[in-house]
Image (spheres, rainbow, N blue to C red):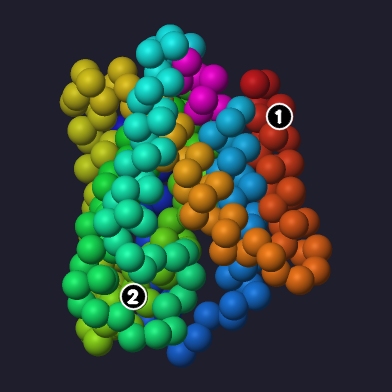
Amino acid sequence: MTSLLYAVLAAAGNLVGAVAITARPRWSPRTLELFLAFSAGFLVAVAVTGLLPEAVTHSGVEAAPMILGGFLAVHLTQHALVGHFHFGEETHHVSKAVSASALAGLLLHTFVDGVAIASAFGVNAELGALVFGAVFLHKVPEGLAIASLWIASGRTRRAALGAAAALGGATLAGVVLTDLSTWLSHWGLALSAGVTLYVGASNLIPEFQGKAGWWHNAAFFAGCGIALGLRALMGH
């Protein structure tokens, strides 16, 4: 029940991001870049210091192929099969087919977000809270991305909110099915580790890489530091 409540809060992040697009003409690019940089640092730190070691402890060395599988699955669904996707506001026209394929790819990703939350709480409440934080941080730009893609493809703002709500629903489904599935309960941590690492390192970091100045790097390292600090305060 605790993991489901946190999943509801995380799913709300998709709607927050979508509202940021549908309620105003433009999102401040610099604000978004700094938020993405902070989120990337937090996700990478949680994946490397939390999910990866716990996955190996839980499933042994057999966890390694599943970690890789989660990593590759995100690349396949968000980049190999979808030719146009990034975690930022879409300012160019895209086809409805592109926006639909992006939604399909993100549905798998957000489903694993729910798996990650449920699996982490299965270890302990402290890891669960950290993973929830990591999930919530990228939920907001995720909702922003899908809503802007939906609008850029010519769909209505209401439809854009519906797409973001679908992503939130997939997260809730991930929690419920992890609690019901023996396979997901066993491999959920490993799968989530690969997905979380990919989202932080391959999805979010490129969104601010190469930007002038040190603010983006400072935000990234701050995200890493806060994640590590929270783990230390929690006694892990």
* Residue occupying image coordinates x 41% and y 38%: 71
Q: Indicate the position of residue 110 as horizontal and vertical percent values.
A: 33, 49
- Residue 121, relative to residue 167: is it above or below? above
Q: Amino acid at mark 1?
A: Leu
Determine which of the numbered discs, if any, sits on residue 233 in the image: 1
Q: Is residue 27 magenta?
A: no
Nearest to the eye among marks 2 and 1: give it.
Answer: 2
Q: Residues within 10 Å of mark 1 (few under 14, many from 20)?
A: few
Coordinates of residue 16 in the picture (x, y in percent): 42, 67
User: Residue at the right extreme?
Assistant: 214
Look at the image and give the residue range highlighted in magenta.
50-56
- On the image, the x and y values in percent for residue 40 come to 59, 51
Question: Is residue 29 among the parts visible in the rendering?
Answer: yes
* Amino acid at the residue labelled 2: Leu
Query: On residue 149, which mark appears?
Result: 2
Q: Residue at x 41, y 50 (%)?
A: 10
Q: Is residue 23 above or below residue 72?
A: below
Q: Is residue 74 above or below residue 57?
A: below
Residue 133 in the image: above or below residue 14: above
Secondary structure of the residue carrying tag 1 is: helix
State yes or no: residue 51 in magenta: yes
Main secondary-structure element of the magenta-colored stretch: helix
